[in-house]
Image (cartoon, rainbow, N blue to C red):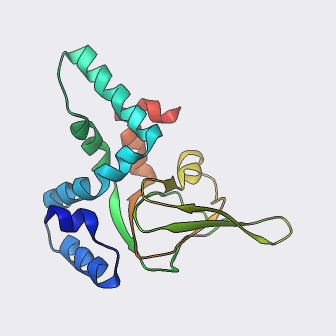
Amino acid sequence: MREFLIFTQGTKQEQKQLNEFFQNISPSLKEKVSILIFSKDIQMNKGLLKVFLNKREQIQKDMQLTIELDDIISIMIQKFKPDFMQPESIIVNQFEDTHDMYLVSKGACLVTLIDEKKNEQIIKELRPGEYFGEIALIYGCKRTATVQSLKYSTLAKLKKSDYQDILIEFPDLKK
């Protein structure tokens, strides 16, 4: 089961199965499955990993406790919700007034923007472990780019209200 959750999701059928599975399990089991799916991807991000290591060091120093990195990461992952995208799906549009952040877990996403001359420019292709939407999430501004799924993609979605909760536990994320 663990291998299925981590290494699949690349086809329409696999995504459909995972989505149906998520719809039919309890909230506590959803949390555990999310940890399985997303923890490796979050650890791939060097900036987030540094925040987690600092938090673990702080807990160990302040409370004289030994704590595993996975336990620290699970605190954050609980706030992320899975979002399954099909190829060519628009996830966010430039100038849209939405404030969710996304972490790419499986698949790939294309970031584009429309410049002042109304030309579309390809900015970057995002791979697992990379994220987008942090500017709108943190500053509450409109989207600065359009992001489209290139493949069957599994994303971890973080809402602004959940981000505020995470900042209480991880104030280093403000930096």
Q: Position of residue 23 (x, y in %)?
A: 21, 74
Res 161 visible: yes
Q: Position of residue 114 (x, y in %)?
A: 75, 68
Residue 30 lies in quadrant: bottom left
Q: Nearer the viewer, residue 173 or 151?
A: 151
Tell me which residue sits at (64%, 58%) in the image: 142
Q: Nearer the viewer, residue 133 or 128?
A: 128
Q: Nearer the viewer, residue 52 or 157?
A: 52
Q: Position of residue 64 (x, y in %)?
A: 19, 15
Q: Is residue 82 above or below residue 160?
A: below
Tell me which residue sits at (34%, 30%) in the image: 53
Q: Nearer the viewer, residue 69 or 63?
A: 69
| Left or right for 114, reference 137 | right
Res 79 visible: no
| Left or right for 34, reference 130 | left
Residue extending farthest bottom: 13
Residue 120 lies in quadrant: bottom right
| Numbered disc total | 0
Tell me which residue sits at (21%, 56%) in the image: 31
Quadrant position of the N terminus in the picture: bottom left
Q: Position of residue 44 (x, y in %)?
A: 39, 47
Residue 66 lies in quadrant: top left
